[in-house]
Amino acid sequence: MKILKSLFTIYALSFAFLMSAQNNQEVIIETQQLSDNVYMLTGQGGNIGICLGEEGVFMIDDQFARLTPKILKAIKALSDKPIQYLINTHYHGDHTGGNENIAQQGAKIIAHDNVYKRLSESTPATPKEALPVISFNDKLQLHINGEDVLVFHVENAHTDGDALLYFTQSNVLHTGDTFFSELYPYIDLDSGGSINGYIEAVKKTLILIDDETKIIPGHGKLSNKAKYQFFLSMLEDLKTKVVAEIESGKSEEDVATNTNITKTYDDLGYSWAFINSERIRRTFYKGLKQ
Ligand SMILES: [Zn+2]
């Protein structure tokens, strides 16, 4: 079990490494305003959400530790108020890498119970300051900066500790990695993620939003409901096709080499460095075969 656990850790670390190594050029943090007080920051790793107001800065995810100075500079350009809260949408290093630095700015870290559990049990050990100080099981409401923010957990989707956030007044949704915009998603089967849970998470969240909602995905470009619906139809289509392959006795290798399954989305450019079309077919096979 110990070997298995460290293999999972290596796997998770290699994802973080790949995310950090995918671009050797200087990282530029770009800021997009989505409403009066909600912004999206992109750089390297998971997309960051920022909410500003009288009560201070409320932040969602923090990419990698080495980017913290640049991220803080981008936030300072928007507000001189301190960072009060930081929410982690899940435990992966490209979303939580800056936790310790942001906590040193005085922010309180909030995350799902399983994020606390995974970070506090990780090898090498996570510094105490980088751990959430508030964790929750199902959902949480934050009333800050004139916003009622619904933070809710979805079960076994990208991992076993995913949280999504919906800003009711600004009509902005941050999905964490339960949505990759115009890209094949990473579904971390070794950290409690599942194909069916991932599909259910998108279905559940679609009920909350409308045609005007601005969606900050975990990775990729700013999105909207129509694109999110298309993403759901892709997941369901891949599931149907891979289930049919499994039922007709096909092996993982058969599915891995059957490019017809993903052709429509390959043609749209959904394949990328970390989750290419072969990897998404293998993920669906493994996830649905279980
Ligand atoms: Zn992730």
Image (cartoon, rainbow, N blue to C red):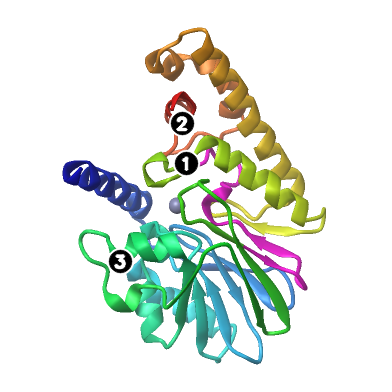
Q: Quadrant of residue 91?
A: bottom left
**In the image, 20: left or right of 277?**
left
Residue 187, disc: 1
Q: Residue at x 48, y 14 (%)?
A: 258
Q: Is residue 16 magenta?
A: no
Q: Is residue 183 magenta?
A: yes
Q: Residue furthest right?
A: 211
Q: Residue at x 56, y 42 (%)?
A: 198
Crowding around mark 2 (Cα neighbors within 10 Å: few <14, some 14 to 19, many 20+) is: some
Q: Amino acid at mark 3?
A: Ser
**In the image, 216: left or right of 219?**
right
**Would you name the residue on which mark 2 appears?**
287
Q: Amino acid at mark 2?
A: Gly
**Would you name the residue on which mark 3 appears?**
120
| Secondary structure at numbered mark 3 | helix
Asked if the residues shown at circle 2 and circle 3 are in contact, with their CB atoms under 8 angstroms apart, the answer is no
Asked if the residues shown at circle 1 and circle 2 are in contact, with their CB atoms under 8 angstroms apart, the answer is yes
Q: Earlier in the sequence, mark 3 or mark 1?
A: 3
**In the image, 176: left or right of 14?**
right
Q: Quadrant of residue 70?
A: bottom left
Nearest the viewer among 70 and 148 is 148
Q: Which residues are magenta?
A: 165-185
Nearest the viewer among 119 and 84 is 119
Q: Considering the image in quadrants, where does the C terminus appear?
A: top left
Q: Earlier in the sequence, mark 2 or mark 3?
A: 3
Crowding around mark 3 (Cα neighbors within 10 Å: few <14, some 14 to 19, many 20+) is: some
Crowding around mark 1 (Cα neighbors within 10 Å: few <14, some 14 to 19, many 20+) is: many
| Secondary structure at numbered mark 2 | helix
